[in-house]
Image (tube, coloured by chain):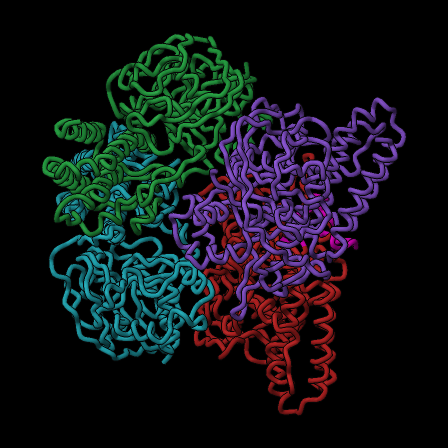
Chain colours: A purple, B red, C cyan, D green
Amino acid sequence: MSRADILARYRAVRAHTREICAPLRTEDYVVQPITDVSPPRWHIAHVTWFFEQFVLGKYAPDYKPYHPDYAFLFNSYYNLVGERTERPKRGLLTRPTVDELWAYREEIDARMTRLLESCDDATLAELLPVLEIGLNHEQQHQELLLTDIKFILFQAPLYPAYREDAPAAARRADTGWSEFEGGLVEIGHDGNGFAFDNEGPRHKQFLRPFRLANDLVSNADYLRFMQDGGYSRPELWLSDGWDVAQREGWQAPLYWLEREGRRQTFTLHGLRELQPDKPVRHVSYYEADAYARWAGKRLPTEFEWEHAIVQAGAMSAVSGQNQPASAKPTSLKLRRPGATAGKPGLVGQVWEWTGSAYLPYPGYRAPEGAIGEYNGKFMVNQMVLRGGSLATPAGHIRPTYRNFWHPDKRWQFTGIRLAEDA
Amino acid sequence: MSRADILARYRAVRAHTREICAPLRTEDYVVQPITDVSPPRWHIAHVTWFFEQFVLGKYAPDYKPYHPDYAFLFNSYYNLVGERTERPKRGLLTRPTVDELWAYREEIDARMTRLLESCDDATLAELLPVLEIGLNHEQQHQELLLTDIKFILFQAPLYPAYREDAPAAARRADTGWSEFEGGLVEIGHDGNGFAFDNEGPRHKQFLRPFRLANDLVSNADYLRFMQDGGYSRPELWLSDGWDVAQREGWQAPLYWLEREGRRQTFTLHGLRELQPDKPVRHVSYYEADAYARWAGKRLPTEFEWEHAIVQAGAMSAVSGQNQPASAKPTSLKLRRPGATAGKPGLVGQVWEWTGSAYLPYPGYRAPEGAIGEYNGKFMVNQMVLRGGSLATPAGHIRPTYRNFWHPDKRWQFTGIRLAEDA
Amino acid sequence: MSRADILARYRAVRAHTREICAPLRTEDYVVQPITDVSPPRWHIAHVTWFFEQFVLGKYAPDYKPYHPDYAFLFNSYYNLVGERTERPKRGLLTRPTVDELWAYREEIDARMTRLLESCDDATLAELLPVLEIGLNHEQQHQELLLTDIKFILFQAPLYPAYREDAPAAARRADTGWSEFEGGLVEIGHDGNGFAFDNEGPRHKQFLRPFRLANDLVSNADYLRFMQDGGYSRPELWLSDGWDVAQREGWQAPLYWLEREGRRQTFTLHGLRELQPDKPVRHVSYYEADAYARWAGKRLPTEFEWEHAIVQAGAMSAVSGQNQPASAKPTSLKLRRPGATAGKPGLVGQVWEWTGSAYLPYPGYRAPEGAIGEYNGKFMVNQMVLRGGSLATPAGHIRPTYRNFWHPDKRWQFTGIRLAEDA
Amino acid sequence: MSRADILARYRAVRAHTREICAPLRTEDYVVQPITDVSPPRWHIAHVTWFFEQFVLGKYAPDYKPYHPDYAFLFNSYYNLVGERTERPKRGLLTRPTVDELWAYREEIDARMTRLLESCDDATLAELLPVLEIGLNHEQQHQELLLTDIKFILFQAPLYPAYREDAPAAARRADTGWSEFEGGLVEIGHDGNGFAFDNEGPRHKQFLRPFRLANDLVSNADYLRFMQDGGYSRPELWLSDGWDVAQREGWQAPLYWLEREGRRQTFTLHGLRELQPDKPVRHVSYYEADAYARWAGKRLPTEFEWEHAIVQAGAMSAVSGQNQPASAKPTSLKLRRPGATAGKPGLVGQVWEWTGSAYLPYPGYRAPEGAIGEYNGKFMVNQMVLRGGSLATPAGHIRPTYRNFWHPDKRWQFTGIRLAEDA
């Protein structure tokens, strides 16, 4: 990429964060209703701090910290970088104000621009991989901003809408299945183009023949599970899942309400009637797993999922990487980020829970230093999700991408695709 | 009072709330760092709701609720009025926004003005006592606003100042004691002028001869207690107090910091050097009691306190009520609200913990209906404070006024005056 | 008292603890179902440790600790004596075993016997007040043993009985009231005979005319309160009480059950049909206060209660102390400890909640040293109970005796007597 | 097996539980210091209830429950069987007493004997698989009894010993490594002989070449990790592990103490000096993983582990199953249960944490009915351990056996074997 291209990409990613925040009121930036949800003011500062800490701090000549307290305030979890605000207390702070944080962003953007324009080629080559991580990092926070904003607005009994435009139209179902032969297959990123460290090394997995549902589980499907006693039959649930469901009183996915006898769901467009044909969203791994057991199926492993997508020939639509070993026709397609998800068989509508624990691939080593804390240290107690959601930015939907959350989390845009042995 | 006087008083009280909020940034209105501290946005709406609920709702012709959800959102604890937001969750809400709540205030003020100008005399006579409670209620929240704002600003590592003007100058100490004979004395409000229900009925208490310190315990006094091991000697403490001090790691009053070897204290004027001659503030009852035990003294009872103030002839400076039975000269004076507290012997600088539990006076009956929830239902587990602080509005410093808090609370402007048997 | 009398008294008190434990199985000695309830193995060791620590440790020649760890294990709350097992962890220990603790008791009894028989008169005179506190202390734990055993046995779904003999017969009600003139009265112990430090100094209180119910509130009375929505009407409750009742789901007194449509109550005699005429037991202060408000009455203050008992001339039945100032006939009588409580008007059937907070009397000073931790440091957050229960040992029912518990406690033998202004 | 053999096996397994409990005092049977640890009285009743519920309840003619409450009391987690005591409350019960529970065991043993002697052959064939699960279940609880007894005795400051015989002698270290080629290998039980459902289906896994340490990590090894700051360097830890280590204040494995400057460790033989050459025990997965990262190695996957053991030809020493595909010489051996573990290279000294999450093997289906709750519903949030410990009964050490615990658990006999890529 030319310097102009690099700068253009930097500006585009940064501008998108601002677009996401445009509908917010100042108050919405401040609160943290649950520990998982960070205040938007924290997000916009934290992604900026990443560039200050890891790019300017290392490569900018005569670098001086923007503010002596910001590293403490906006470091998220990089233990090697120093102390930080305890996560559950992010929502107790009111200063620096939102305006001050936008000013902080502008100053860092100005410094980044100067650095990218003026540094020598060797420095540019050295900082580019870190810059790329920083941009991908900000894009991950763009999806988090949307999930967190949704949760924050949900607290108000007024159920305010985040956006006023019409939601995507309902789609028709494709109830078919795609079949795959399995065998000894290659899994993981091949190194062409950007990927997170956790997507490699590319390695072999042995898969038995399996089938994958062309379509996601819909709200109507999930309602049948509920009406068949899904939330009151322990034999359908993992033990830890049953415990949390009882303790939290789960009776439906997050954001589902019953108001005056009608089922509604809270969306970024405000409170809406439940659409039976849309994919069910905001279910935990426990619910996804219980649903699959009820349906007599199972969740796919992350290896089956990745192999299926590659087999389906969807890769060319996204990038040149991971060319399919064969071109067996299937109905699975990867959504091109930004495109409307109206067709069945597309992945990229919701993050799809897999039955795989988030663990290092064989031969995985975390990078040295604080950047090494990005992925590796979370490889326990979480389940892998594949695909992407309507909130996922461009470049974050690819066959090898590994998203991961603890199995009780529900505030992300998560859904269910079934699998079975062939 | 004439209608014009009534309206003027209503407007003055309401305007003062707005003045208190003037230095706030929008973000400061939203958070609730601990359950005790309510977000300012909640305060300004709640005091407004009180007038809507108890005055307009009952007396305004063709009354319609301003918003169907506001009663739910801004009811504080009136169980009889209906459901309400759980107290610890007040800080999770971002809507209605602060601007919307100021608009709510303006509309209610307009409706109140119309009602007060146009209702017939009988209605006016009937609503006046409720109006008076509403105004006193708002004034109580004015002090709470200041205590809560201080606590909120304290969360930020930047230690922002609420106000930029110079703090009150230090005063010289008066180390003397005033002596009182006691006997069978009259305690409680006599019914002339406004008082809260908990200040009556006026009744007899028998007091033994006692002495009251002319001055409050100072920061320098309290430092000596600390340096003598005050926080590590269980024999000085009540058992419940020792437990909370250990659990919370108390080593000094709230807001005291050590930075680079210097003692500082966080104030509404930002971080300041500790002033040895100023009264110690932000101590719990447990600390006040432990200090008194260490000093070989005790806290006064609320009856001794009230009797001493009346005896001291301080009443005339405040109102015509409770004329002293005698005019024995003492150094105790009640601060005229709004005046600078620079002279020794004045009460009204900090709320003074007494050794009396908050209980009903003999013959006390709570009023009927929701207004009856104002005071009576809190008469357990709390200790009485007397006097008033620099944050206390006019009309809330009088000899019979009973403030009350649980004995572990420290974020109010609380201090210590010693007593001993004569 | 002669040495023989002293020894006889020591042996009698100590023997009674053993009698109380006779029906226990070894397992019953070990558990601590809630923090308030101590395992019986802890009680029997702790009361023994008191004699070892405060009598033998000070007065026995050549004293050596029985075991180096016992002071740590069986100190309850004497901070000045040293570290101790955290209270909530008493029920995690299985060693020393119950047999080893009985052996500990025997050895300490032997040493105490030797000391009391052989010490010189001056030493005897000096240790006697401590011995007396030790015996009264053990008697307090005798009542605690019974309340704790009851709670422990209640955990088992089998509802085992502690004792097999028949419970006391039901009594007839006396629905009358006794009236008292009040005035400036003397309250507190006069120093003749043993009393705890918290019963003095004797001092004056001014009482307004009042009436006291001759009889306790019965189960039938309390059922009417329940059937009238007592547990679902917040206007009847103190705010802190309402909170705890909601949080804990209170719908009836502790130990009340509904089984197959019948009301039953768990007693030391096992599960029994609820007896309408018996005094309601195992209610918290919050419930007692709510009941009184529902009934249009109030609880007596501890001063009214004490004055009434003295006025009623009940004292002569108990001891020579506190002779009544007058002999106005009333129906109130103090139960002679050990006697059956079958007659109306008797106090000593349940501990009676008063409306008085547990605070020091005017002029009270805690004794120096660890013994001073006995009463004074608990003088906050608790309410006074007067009278005594069927589990109260001889010598612990007297007009000036002040029992105290936090207002949410229900596992003690607590009940309700109403009062009203005359 | 003949009926006589079946009965002999039943009696032998049941008798061993009694042998394990022989050194206990009654008090030791009752407590539950942490939720993970069940009271021994619960263990002995629960394993008995299993036979009553699943064998007698289904196959015994004229079956009547031994006691109407026992199913409620001693069901552990079989949701389909009905309600049960909440797990954290097992230690609050004192009844039925230990003697009553031994009587319960005797009666069930008598009934089981009658059934096994007198049922027809078809019934015997049908019940045998359930009986076998019941016996393996009781053996699992035999190891739990020992881990739980150790934790219970550790609560007492007296550090009582469970057994008085001499502990196993220290062994010499074998610092070598065994190398394996990997490839597409078969994993899981082949169906010959008893195995739990989670050990199958047998299936293929692809392994890269790897090395496995011949010996376990020793106390001396682990001390070096500690002395190199192992517990204070976040970069060595998984994020969830770092959090729990900070929260719980971990500074060493469980049961390690420093007393008067010497390192000691609490064992079933009481408090002992730390033996440098013995395998480190009582470490969590988090500690095992951090140690491996510090050492520049990693933990083996469960597939590598199983393959290595099979390759090592250790199987013939244990059973005829899983004959090694090749006979490549290595130093790894499986301990014959019951034999002394004094030689290096043996597995079966501690349970060895693997880097594999506990998930179903491809094609796994839980059995129908309550028995199906045995293993499958725990397949989330836990890590697999392989091998066995000195507390593991005969028949529970085999190459395919999958033990599993949450990654923060430390009270099991858990240790560390390192692996690395070849």
D400 on left or right of C195? right
Residue D378 placement (x, y as % from top left): 41, 39
Is residue B333 visible in the rendered structure shown here?
A: no
Residue A190 in the image: above or below residue B35 = above
Judge by depth and name the residue closer to the eye, C196 or D405: D405
Residue B92 placement (x, y as % from top left): 61, 56
Judge by depth and name the residue closer to the eye, D162 or A360: A360
Asked if residue B220 is among those painted magenta in the image, a careful observer would answer no
Determine the image quadrant of residue C404.
bottom left
Judge by depth and name the residue closer to the eye, B57 or B418: B57
Magenta stretch in the rendered image:
B150-175
A317 on left or right of D331? right
Q: Quadrant of the N terminus of chain B?
A: bottom right
Residue C118 placement (x, y as % from top left): 17, 34
Determine the image quadrant of residue B7.
bottom right
Asked if residue B154 is among those painted magenta in the image, a careful observer would answer yes
